[in-house]
Image: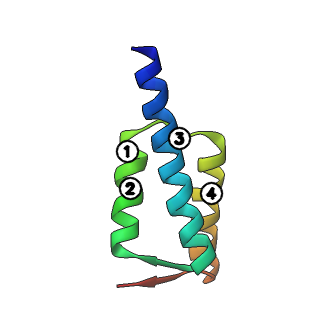
């Protein structure tokens, strides 16, 4: 059972990481990206790396470096 939880944990982290990196690289976040990110963050453990990436998104939005697109 621990192995299954560990694999699921890694899967969630990589998905959060992939999505946040996509947003940071494109400097755009869609409503769909936002919904997916919120769903992932609410449903899983967030590691330090993923938290740093999410913080960069919030900073980018605050500073106008990331655009919100539909």
Q: Where is residue 61 in the image (x, y as percent from the top left)?
A: 56, 75
Whether residues under marks 4 and 1 lie with C-beta atoms below 8 angstroms apart, the answer is: no
Evaluate if marks 2 and 1 touch, with contact meaning CB atoms under 8 Å apart.
Answer: yes
Determine the CA span between mark 3 and mark 2.
Answer: 12 Å
The label on residue 46 is 3
In this rendering, the answer to whether 64 lies above or below 40 is below
- Mark 1–mark 3 distance (CA, rounded to whole Å): 9 Å
Dot placed on the residue nearer the N-terminal end, 2 or 4: 2
Find residue 31 and report its horizontal and vertical position in percent: 35, 74
For label 4, the residue is: 53
Q: Which of marks 4 and 1 is nearer the N terminus?
A: 1
**Which label sits on residue 42?**
1
Lower position in the chain sequence, tag 3 or tag 2: 2
Q: In which quadrant will I find the C terminus?
A: bottom left
How many C-alpha atoms fall within 10 Å of the one at disc 3: few (<14), some, or many (≥20)? some
Distance from label 2 to label 1 (Cα)? Answer: 6 Å
Residue at numbered disc 2: 38
């Amino acid at each position: 059972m621990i192995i299954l939880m560990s694999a699921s944990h890694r899967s969630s982290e990589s998905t959060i990481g992939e999505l946040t990196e996509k947003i940071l690289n494109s400097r755009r976040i869609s409503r769909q990206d936002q919904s997916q990110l919120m769903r992932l963050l609410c449903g899983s453990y967030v590691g330090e790396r993923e938290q740093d990436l999410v913080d960069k998104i919030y900073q980018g939005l605050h500073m106008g470096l990331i655009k919100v697109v539909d």
